[in-house]
């Protein structure tokens, strides 16, 4: 193996080790969850092992004068010719690694939500409805809650976790209070949205960050969470609209634990859930700020 081949082999080995170290850094700092859904971790562990193995082999071959060169004599496998061409090609691979180490590992926030849009239930909106005069109360429980009862902030452990969607429907329908747990965030919001009239007046509790659009009125905000299917590239923003001046005055991206009563509001001819008369407390950002997407298995 001549010196030119050894040099390119060595550089490629270093690049592979660079990607391995970047993955290792994300694992050790527990920041990988800011980019990848937890269910994908197994694939990243496999990739880490492959990068380390192949990188080490390439570095050893690139530094050994006894290494043999193998060529299939076919087009397309030749080394880049010229220093400038080599530099440009390898820069394409080195640049992401350098950025990965230099840039902070930030969580997606309201700025990204404004560009992607927010889903309340199954409704995507950019400007929320005007609640005043449009809210439709369909049951006595909602009126009683406004006049006598006060929502409370309870432990999330008080609400069971159920993977079966139909069984979760029964649980949500039978409970006096709906607690939206991270493990079944999308499932619970979907159930409420599908049978909204049934849940008007019920108490609901969830945790999320404050999102406010320019078109919001002075007492509106959305308690939001990013939902990730595979990675942050496919992240969507889901949440519940809340009507409360104190909450609307909070800074965007403030994490809160909220409990209030479900009401319904008309938006483009469709009912949309809204939280009224809330109580809340500021909380720290959860260890995993994202929740996972949910798909119903069709048999």
Image: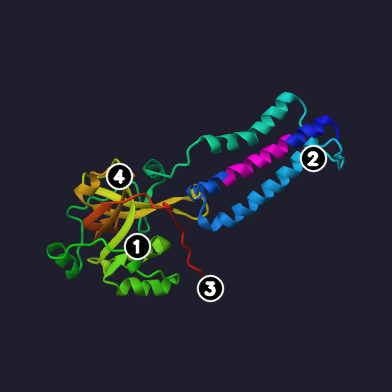
Of labels 3 and 1, the one closer to you:
1
* For the residues bearing labels 3 and 2, Cβ distance under 8 angstroms: no
Element type at marker 2?
A: helix
Residue bearing mark 2:
61
Which quarter shows the N terminus?
top right
- x and y, in percent, of residue 188 in the image: 37, 64
Of labels 3 and 2, the one closer to you:
2
Which numbered disc flags the more N-terminal residue, 3 or 1? 1
Query: Is residue 259 found inside the magenta-colored segment of the image?
Result: no
Q: Residues within 10 Å of mark 2 (few under 14, many from 20)?
A: many
Image: magenta residue range: 11-24
Residue 25 visible? The answer is yes
Of labels 1 and 4, the one closer to you:
1
Residue 240 falls in image quadrant: bottom left
Element type at marker 1?
A: loop
Q: CA distance from mark 3 to mark 2?
A: 52 Å
Residue bearing mark 4:
212
Q: Which mark is residue 180?
A: 1
Q: CA distance from mark 2 to mark 4?
A: 56 Å
């Amino acid at each position: 193996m001549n010196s030119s081949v050894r040099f390119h082999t060595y550089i490629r080995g270093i690049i592979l080790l660079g990607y391995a170290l970047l993955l290792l850094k994300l694992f050790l700092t527990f920041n990988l969850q800011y980019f990848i859904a937890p269910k994908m971790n197994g694939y990243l562990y496999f990739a880490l092992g492959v990068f380390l193995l192949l990188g080490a082999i390439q570095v050893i071959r690139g530094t050994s004068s006894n290494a043999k060169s193998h060529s299939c004599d076919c087009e397309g496998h030749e080394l880049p010719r010229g220093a400038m061409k080599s530099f440009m090609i390898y820069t394409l691979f080195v640049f992401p690694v350098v950025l990965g180490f230099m840039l902070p590992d930030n969580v997606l926030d309201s700025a990204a939500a404004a560009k992607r849009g927010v889903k309340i239930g199954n409704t995507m909106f950019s400007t929320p409805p005007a609640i005043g005069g449009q809210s439709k109360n369909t049951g006595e429980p909602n009126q009683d809650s406004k006049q006598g009862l006060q929502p409370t902030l309870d432990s999330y452990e008080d609400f069971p976790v159920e993977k079966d969607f139909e069984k979760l429907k029964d649980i949500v329908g039978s409970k006096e209070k709906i607690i939206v747990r991270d493990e079944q965030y999308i499932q619970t919001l979907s159930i409420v949205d599908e049978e909204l009239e049934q849940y008007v007046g019920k108490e609901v509790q969830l945790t999320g960050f404050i999102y406010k659009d320019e078109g919001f009125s002075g007492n509106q905000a959305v308690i939001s969470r990013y939902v990730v299917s595979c990675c942050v590239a496919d992240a969507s923003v889901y949440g519940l609209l809340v009507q409360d001046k104190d909450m609307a005055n909070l800074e965007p991206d403030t994490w809160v634990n909220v409990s209030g009563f479900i009401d319904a509001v008309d938006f483009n001819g469709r009912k949309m859930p809204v939280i009224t008369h809330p109580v809340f407390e500021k909380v720290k950002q959860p260890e995993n700020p994202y929740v996972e997407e949910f798909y119903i298995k069709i048999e």
